[in-house]
Amino acid sequence: MTTLQDLTTKALDRRAPTRDEAMAVLTDTHDVLDVVAAAGTVRRHFFGRRVKLNTIINMKSGMCPEDCTYCSQRLGSTSEILKYSWISPEEAAETADRAAQAGAKRICLVASGRGPGQRDVRRIAETIEEIKAAQPDVEICACLGLLKDGQAEELRDAGVYAYSHNLNTNEDRYADICSTHTFTDRVETVGKATTAGMSSCSGAIFGMGESDEDVVALAFELLELDPDSVPINFLIPMEGTPLSEDWTLTPERCLRILALYRFFFPDVEVRLAGGREIHLRGQQTLALHLANSIFLGDYLTSEGQTGDEDRRMITDAGFTIEGTDEQTLPDQRHDLVAIRRRGTGTELPSNA
Ligand code: SF4
């Protein structure tokens, strides 16, 4: 039988677990504290005790024509969430400025909807200009839905550093959680972002009735995308959505999932995202031994722990907040991304 020490050794060598090894992490084959300790070794090897802070700015809230069952902004949602159209670049910049002063290194500009129109891409460009005027060092991530051909390049040229588009659940179950777009649509958008040269961010939502096999299948599917960042969300069962009664997660289940994704993505930003407070509860600090990145404060449509509580939690647990002058990903992942210095726009031929 594979031991946790074997799994740790593989992860330090950046080799993924096998399906059987992955299943053992999710079941009670190993005690949960032993699992956390083993995956925590991997986390510390690649990321030390740094925690990167990210902030979400919901640029446009609610009124989405898509029907993702987990989402309070979906078509037919009766959730009593804030609904508004695009906020101004100035308002977004003020929020980003406050977040950066509170320690956020990445600002995630998110908008509801199937995907951006050309006017929306221009709005994002103007917003980035405003944000960067006051906070030139923050990383800008955009999360705007499905991208049409050419839009990834436009967003990149507008100053978007990373594009976020979660797979959310594995391919076999995708039609159970959404009927208005497909798993393949999502994979293609992540591919467009990566091809355009943006850092890719793609992750999951757990707590939607998935089996252990589904959790493992999604890890393998995400691995194929080779993302730089993998957000792990735990379902926030909002009143007014089809999944409002789905309170199935336990702190132990969340910790095992986070540990598994650390084994799959040892040198990648594993980001603890929505739902951490309500599902991990008193075990959030243990989760910091697995994830190297968290969202600060509030989420898209629900409130989270306060920034002060987050910062205290991080320092009390012996971690430090990552500064803008610190590199997030280890050197070897940076080395994988070679800025193009040949072909169009240079004196050199392309490698075609
Ligand atoms: S997840 Fe995005 S695309 Fe799906 S309903 Fe919510 S806002 Fe719309």
Image (cartoon, rainbow, N blue to C red):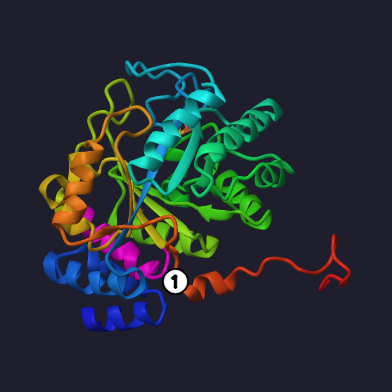
Q: Nearer the viewer, residue 261 or 99?
A: 99
Q: Nearer the viewer, residue 262 or 347?
A: 347
Percent x, y for residue 328?
A: 43, 62
Percent x, y for residue 7?
A: 29, 78
* Residue at the outermost front position: 134
Find disc 1 in the rendering and name its residue.
330
Residue drawn at (36%, 74%) of the image: 17
* Image-quadrant location for residue 343: bottom right
The answer to whether residue 193 is left or right of residue 307 is: right
Residue drawn at (14%, 44%) of the image: 281
Residue 34 drawn above or below residue 50: below
Magenta residues? 254-268
Residue 76 drawn above or below residue 213: above
Say which amino acid is labelled 1: Pro
Quadrant placement of the N terminus: bottom left
* Image-quadrant location for residue 177: top left
Residue 156 drawn above or below residue 113: below
Tell me, yes or no, if residue 248 can be seen here.
no
Residue drawn at (57%, 74%) of the image: 335
Question: In this figure, what is the number of numbered marks?
Answer: 1
Can residue 255 be found in the magenta stretch? yes
Kindly state the secondary structure of the residue where label 1 is placed.
Answer: loop
Percent x, y for residue 245?
A: 22, 30
Tell me, yes or no, if residue 273 can be seen here.
yes
The answer to whether residue 197 is left or right of residue 173 is: right
Quadrant placement of the C terminus: bottom right
